[in-house]
């Protein structure tokens, strides 16, 4: 592909960050992949509490659309039909979910909530991300990759960023919002409509263009991380989750894309999958009840998923608060029953062997939860 | 801040001002207009991943009151900062500067 100066600038935006290498070539390195879903992923539609009698009543059309094909988990929960890879991993004890968890601070703003999740400190510090602090505390070969310098990776050391060469199409959600913005502009509005129609019509021939972004990034991330002396830590992001309207078809597509990305991670990590933990979380969940536009609005508690060969999977964690009006948070949301940092801390403790003092630097004031989330192994501290 | 926006906007224009028959502005007629716009959208979407500034701050500090309320609201309601920045750069006002 012909490289223009602008592309070269971004294509080579590599910033390095690593600690001294003290590794034996044959040592198994515990890998951590942080996947941030931006927009407030509707966890109640990802992991459906079908066993809760209040659920279907408050989400009639959303539940009706998927309950037939939902994939059984346990405790009355089932996965969205599109999450086939995730379900397979659960059955193979390589995936677990934590229900009804949330960050320590409440806000309904995407920007603020994402900052809170990425920073992980009691007060937002835009220059200090939890991943950076974790990698700092982890005394191994700490190298992290991401495709942007989002807060999670900011801190005392630089982050390595990398982006694939091809230019996948912009997310559908951006185009939908642009259509709204161009409503009163005849020229731009018709150009956009024409452009989107053409893309839809081209279908297969342009499939590489319309190729979904997340699986492409996941594949690249895994390829990089699974190399000899590859990074121990990587970050991936996926947007489009803000499903205020038309949630059913949008989430069908989004969950399929997320699921394919997880599959790409497993395939890409190859033999390293056995010592990998993928952590999937979103800044907040969504309202319990459907709204008037076939979607849901910004909520509070959500579900966090862990996937990977190193995960002690096949389990559901978290206390389920119930969905009755009195059980809801502010009368509209799923009530959080834990701080998400407790679970992240436990992963760092069990997967990277961080001690209590080090964990206190990553998540001050939050103790790791006492639950076995990662398989015990002798290859911890490098 | 202004120079950042100018630079970003110029970069967003780059694939289309190549001086070749493929370089049509998004405001021209016919298929070339819509194709150019879609390419610009893809380009800006990717570009926006690399900028860490808050799009709302950019709106305040660079544009003040000169943007439409539709654009300002769109940026504020974006589901992420990079999407907010993409919406700003692709807004009708900036497409016509």
Image: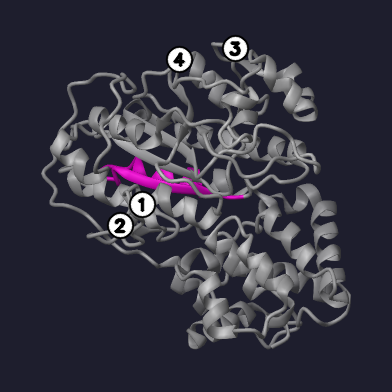
Place residue A18 in its image quadrant.
bottom left
Give me the C-alpha separation between circle 3 and circle 1: 33 Å
Identify the residue position indicated by label 4 in the image.
Answer: A314
Tell me where the magenta segment starts and ends, as one range: A217-239
Residue A382 seen by the camera = no
Q: Is residue B32 left or right of residue A133?
A: right
Place residue A79 in its image quadrant.
top right
Q: What is the secondary structure assignment of the residue under circle 4?
A: loop
Circles 2, 1 touching at the beta carbon (< 8 Å): yes
Q: Is residue A148 left or right of residue B28?
A: left
Q: Quadrant of the C terminus of chain A?
A: top left
Most distant residue in the front direction:
A326
- Badge 1: chain ID: A
Density class for disc 4 (Cα within 10 Å; few <14, some 14-19, many ≥20) is some
- Placement of A360 over or under A270, stated as above or below: below
Q: What is the secondary structure assignment of the residue under circle 1?
A: helix
Please tell me which residue lies in front, A150 or A85: A150
Q: Is residue B6 left or right of residue A19?
A: right
Identify the residue position indicated by label 2 in the image.
Answer: A128
Q: Position of residue B61 (x, y in %)?
A: 52, 82
- Badge 4: chain ID: A
Q: What is the secondary structure assignment of the residue under circle 2?
A: loop
**Of callouts 3 and 4, which one flags the residue occurring earlier in the amino acid sequence?**
3
**Of callouts 2 and 1, which one flags the residue occurring earlier in the amino acid sequence?**
1
């Amino acid at each position: 592909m012909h490289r223009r100066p602008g592309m070269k600038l971004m294509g080579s935006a590599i910033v390095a960050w690593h600690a001294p290498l003290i590794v034996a070539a044959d040592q198994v390195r515990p890998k951590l992949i942080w996947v941030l879903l931006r927009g407030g992923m509707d966890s109640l539609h990802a992991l459906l509490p079908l066993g809760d009698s209040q659920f279907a009543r408050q989400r009639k059309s959303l539940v009706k659309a998927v309950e037939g094909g939902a994939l059984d988990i346990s405790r009355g929960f089932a996965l969205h039909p599109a999450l086939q890879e995730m379900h397979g991993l659960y059955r193979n004890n390589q995936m677990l979910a934590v229900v009804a968890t949330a960050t320590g601070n409440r806000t309904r703003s995407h920007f603020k909530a994402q900052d809170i999740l990425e920073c992980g400190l009691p007060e937002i510090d835009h220059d200090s991300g939890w991943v950076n602090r974790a990698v700092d505390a982890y005394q191994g070969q700490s190298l992290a990759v991401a495709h942007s310098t989002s807060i999670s990776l900011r801190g005392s050391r630089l982050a390595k960023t990398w982006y694939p060469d091809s230019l996948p199409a912009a997310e559908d959600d951006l185009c939908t919002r642009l259509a709204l913005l161009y409503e009163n502009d005849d020229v731009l509005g018709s150009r956009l409509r024409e452009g989107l129609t053409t893309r839809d019509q081209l279908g297969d021939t342009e499939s590489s263009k319309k190729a979904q972004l997340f699986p492409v990034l996941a594949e690249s991330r895994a390829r990089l991380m699974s190399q000899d002396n590859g990074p121990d830590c990587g970050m991936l992001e996926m947007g489009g989750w803000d499903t205020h309207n038309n949630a059913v078809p949008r989430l069908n597509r989004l969950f399929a894309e997320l699921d394919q990305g997880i599959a790409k991670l497993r395939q890409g990590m190859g033999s390293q999958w056995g010592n990998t933990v993928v952590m999937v979380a979103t800044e907040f969940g969504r309202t319990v009840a459907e709204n008037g536009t076939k979607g849901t609005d910004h909520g509070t508690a959500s579900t966090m998923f862990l996937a990977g060969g190193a995960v002690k999977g096949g389990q559901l964690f978290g206390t389920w608060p119930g969905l009755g009006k009195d059980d809801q948070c502010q009368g509209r949301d799923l009530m959080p029953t834990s701080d998400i940092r407790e679970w992240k801390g436990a992963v760092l403790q069990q997967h990277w062997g961080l001690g209590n003092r080090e964990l206190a630097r990553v998540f001050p004031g939050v103790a790791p939860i006492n639950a076995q989330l990662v398989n015990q192994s002798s290859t911890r501290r490098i | 801040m202004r120079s950042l926006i100018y630079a970003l906007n110029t970069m967003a224009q780059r694939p289309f001002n190549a001086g070749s028959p493929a370089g049509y502005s998004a405001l021209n007629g016919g298929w070339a207009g819509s194709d150019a716009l879609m390419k610009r959208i893809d380009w800006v979407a990717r570009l926006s991943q690399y900028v860490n500034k808050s799009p709302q701050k950019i709106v305040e500090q660079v544009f003040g009151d000169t943007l439409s309320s539709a654009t300002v609201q769109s940026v504020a309601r974006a589901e992420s900062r990079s999407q907010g920045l993409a919406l700003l750069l692709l807004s009708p006002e900036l497409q016509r500067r």
